[in-house]
Amino acid sequence: MQKIRWHERFENFQLALVNINETYDCIQQNGLNKIYTMALIQAFEIVFELAWKTMKDYLEYEGIKTDTPRQTIKTAFLRNLIPDGQIWIDMMEARNKTSHTYNESFAKSLADEITNKFMPALKELDTIFTGKFNE
């Protein structure tokens, strides 16, 4: 039996979410330093890519084609797949800026945004897709 594509992508998203949560736990225990900041940003890049691609695959499974992260996020919001489209747009824009993490103040600011703003939205997406996965 062939797996449904969005199911496969969602399973990978969940693994990436575990990784970012473990990185966050290390930061909570040891404080934020350069190594943890870089690890958090890298984990964020991966989990965000898998998140929007899971949404894209799910929408495609539902018969809706999207091509870009922005289009996918907007469509997911309009289809009530995500409750806050703006936070996902903010996440996408932050992801697009991650190549600038050589700037220490930017990296620290991004790490703050990831932990305080983006992680709750990623966890919420996990909950939403877990429900759909089990339907």
Image (tube, rainbow, N blue to C red):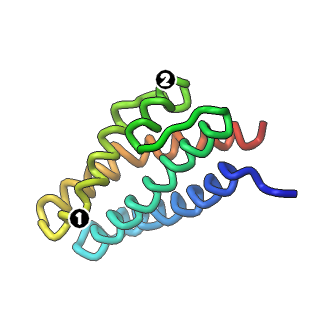
- At x 33%, y 43%, the residue is 117
- At x 55%, y 24%, the residue is 79
Secondary structure category for the residue under label 2: helix
Q: Amino acid at mark 1?
A: Ser
Residue 22, x across and y down, in percent: 47, 66
Residue 68, x across and y down, in percent: 42, 44
Q: Which residue is mark 2?
A: 78
Q: Is residue 1 left or right of residue 8?
A: right
Secondary structure category for the residue under label 1: helix
Q: Is residue 31 left or right of residue 125?
A: left
Q: Nearer the viewer, residue 59 or 92?
A: 59
- At x 37%, y 46%, the residue is 118
Seen in the picture, residue 85 relative to 119 is either above or below; the reply is above
For residue 99, the mark is: 1
Residue 63, x across and y down, in percent: 65, 33
- At x 52%, y 50%, the residue is 53
Among the 4 quarters of the image, the one containing residue 39? bottom left
For residue 44, the mark is: none
Q: Nearer the viewer, residue 87 or 108?
A: 87
Q: Callout 1: few (<14), some (14-19), or many (20+) C-alpha neighbours within 10 Å? A: few
